Image (cartoon, helix red, strand yellow):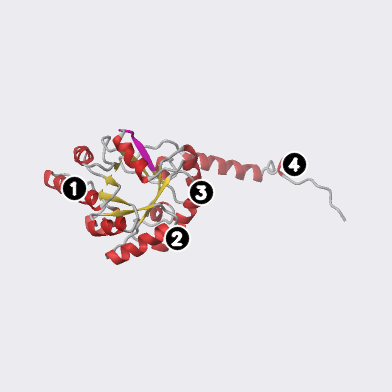
Amino acid sequence: MAITIRDIQSFKTNDSRFVMLTAYDYQTAQIFDEVGVPIIFVGDTLGIFFMGYKTTIPVTMDAMIHHCQAVSRAVSNALLVGDIPFGADATTVDGIRNASRIVQEGGMHAVKLEGSKVELVARLTEIGIPVMGHLGLTPQSFNKLGGNKVQARSVTAAQALLLEARSLEEAGAFALVLEAVPIEAARTVTDSLRIPTIGIGAGPHCDGQVLVSTEMLGISSGPSPRFVKHYAQLRDTMGVATRTFMSEVANGEFPGKEYAYNWPLTS
């Protein structure tokens, strides 16, 4: 049975911890859907992990639509959430137009917005587009923040975070991502909201947890943030498999007869 917004909100009511994972391609999304991941998220992090950019800022709406379509073709059960990329929600009119594209063209069930865009959240909710909020470290503000840094580190900043979270809830957001904030700040927000929080680098007290799948699976190169746990090392596995293939071709072991069509030629 397909996961709905109400199901996600019931996780908090029932105190059931849940996960969200990023997927940017058909095969990965298919695997996650088959094993029962409740929320599959097409994030603008695809700019970093699939396109090779240093930040998410260069990602365009067309790139988001392309990857959303690939993921949506693979999924039958999970709730699909697509990111609104940098600049695509500069105004409320822009945000409505581009959120509609994510749903209509991309096949997503909901969109995610970074920052305290209360008016846009309210308008999208009003016209039937569910919205997931995102506070704390907002990667699209990389240049403004001077890099990816932990947010809400003071009492004053934590109180401001709570006020923003409440405003997004009141505007109609169905869930809220909290990224790179101290444990106690995330706990306070989680305990104060009716909607579920989804943490990434926000400690154990959020209702759900999200990771970038290429980091979680050990495919990405280079250092990972402190909050990432590698549940596999698929980069190493892929390297071993590729070197074995190269070796077998070089020594004539592959392809053997079992991998060839040994049919007699006909006139």
**Over which residues does the magenta segment extend?**
15-20
The answer to whether the residue labelled 4 contacts the one labelled 2, judged by CB atoms less than 8 Å apart, is no
Lower position in the chain sequence, tag 4 or tag 1: 1
Q: Which residue is mark 2?
A: 105
Q: Which residue is mark 3?
A: 74
The answer to whether the residue labelled 3 contacts the one labelled 4, judged by CB atoms less than 8 Å apart, is no
Q: Secondary structure at mark 1?
A: helix
Lower position in the chain sequence, tag 3 or tag 2: 3
The answer to whether the residue labelled 1 contacts the one labelled 3, judged by CB atoms less than 8 Å apart, is no
How packed is label 1: few (under 14 Cα within 10 Å), some, or many (20 or more)? many
Q: Which residue is mark 1?
A: 161
Q: Position of residue 66 (x, y in %)?
A: 46, 59
Which residue is pictured at 47% across the width and 42% down the height? 33
The residue nearer to you, when weighing 131 against 22, is: 131
Q: Secondary structure at mark 3?
A: helix
Which residue is pictured at 16% across the width and 48% down the height? 163
Indicate the amino acid at tag 2: Glu
Q: Nearer the viewer, mark 4 or mark 2?
A: 2
| Cα gap from disc 4 to disc 2, whole angstroms | 46 Å
Q: Nearer the viewer, mark 3 or mark 4?
A: 3
Indicate the amino acid at tag 4: Lys
Lower position in the chain sequence, tag 3 or tag 4: 3
| Cα gap from disc 3 to disc 2, whole angstroms | 15 Å
Q: Nearer the viewer, mark 4 or mark 1?
A: 1
Q: Position of residue 109 (x, y in %)?
A: 40, 52
The residue nearer to you, when weighing 141 against 87, is: 87
Q: Which residue is mark 4?
A: 257
Indicate the amino acid at tag 1: Leu
Which residue is pictured at 45% across the width and 60% down the height? 105
The answer to whether the residue labelled 3 contacts the one labelled 2, judged by CB atoms less than 8 Å apart, is no
